[in-house]
Image (cartoon, helix red, strand yellow):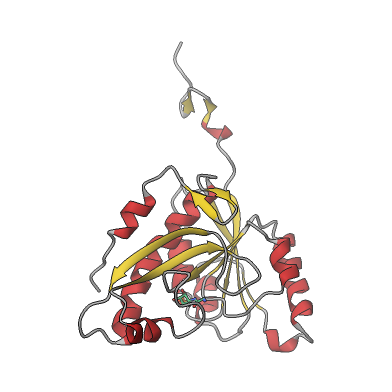
Amino acid sequence: MRRARNSTRNGPASMTAPKKRTAILISGRGSNMKSLVEAARRPDYPAEIVVVISNRPDAAGIAWAKEQGIPAIAMDHKLYSDRAHFESQLHGILTTSRVDLVCLAGFMRLMTPEFVALWRDRMLNIHPALLPAFKGLDTHARALATGVKFAGCTVHLVRPEMDEGPILGQAAVPVLPGDTEPDLAARVLAAEHQLYPRILELFARGQIAIDGNKTSSPSDVNETWAKFSPQV
Ligand code: GAR
């Protein structure tokens, strides 16, 4: 008997897991958001971007998302009485949009432990350093001043402490002689644009196991990214 078109040994293709409904939170340029949106256009990508939210109304990324036809919402945090008020509105939008996963992509606002708890193990962040080194701001200037030979970026699950949480993936890039801060920032950013979509893909497929602070994936992602060294 011939198998129906698009069917597999395990049943029809229509039985594949639904895409994870994903929100992206930004504060500015939104280049990581673009890389996630572009990756999610692939038919086989396991996440779809259902909403983009910025805490700054002037964020360039919001205009781009709207042009792409993605629901994009500016929530000016200055208009809210406090962090809890802002976050309750934000949580309401995420819930109404039936969001499964939240990706922070240059979202430069600390979250309260209460909000983080609501999205525990469902909220990812990208940081432009090889955590736990260089948490916080000015990562590239500090990396250069310290004289490290490798820099890079980290995608991790969000925990209440800033730039903390189980590490889902990292990409290392070399620090080259004569590098300026913009040189290094551009090299790391190029790595971010490849790492974040790949990690979201693995995570949305349930291919990254979390055990306390440790995570593991059957894929060769770590070996691949350790060698990654884009020319920019
Ligand atoms: C990115 O480099 C991201 O890693 C960083 O902000 C930049 C946003 O750029 N995030 C943090 O520093 C968070 N601690 P983008 O708006 O072009 O994606």
Could you tell me residue 188's position as x and y percent?
35, 73
Say which of 39 and 231 sits in front. 231
Could you tell me residue 51's position as x and y percent?
61, 65
Q: Taking 213 as reference, is 114 above or below it?
A: below
Dividing the picture into quadrants, the one containing residue 144 is bottom left
In the rendered image, the quadrant that contains the C terminus is bottom left
Q: Determine if residue 40 is in view.
A: no
Say which of 229 and 214 sits in front. 214
**189 left or right of 232?**
right
Q: Determine if residue 197 is in view.
A: yes
Residue at the spot 32% in from the left edge and 77% down from the top edge: 148
Q: Residue furthest left?
A: 177
Q: Taking 219 as reference, is 77 above or below it?
A: below
Dividing the picture into quadrants, the one containing residue 56 is bottom right
**112 left or right of 227?**
right
Number of dots carrying numbers: 0
Say which of 79 and 219 sits in front. 219
Residue at the spot 49% in from the left edge and 26% down from the top edge: 7
Q: Taking 217 as reference, is 132 above or below it?
A: below
Could you tell me residue 141's position as x and y percent?
38, 86
Residue at the spot 48% in from the left edge and 48% down from the top edge: 216
Could you tell me residue 190's position as x and y percent?
34, 70
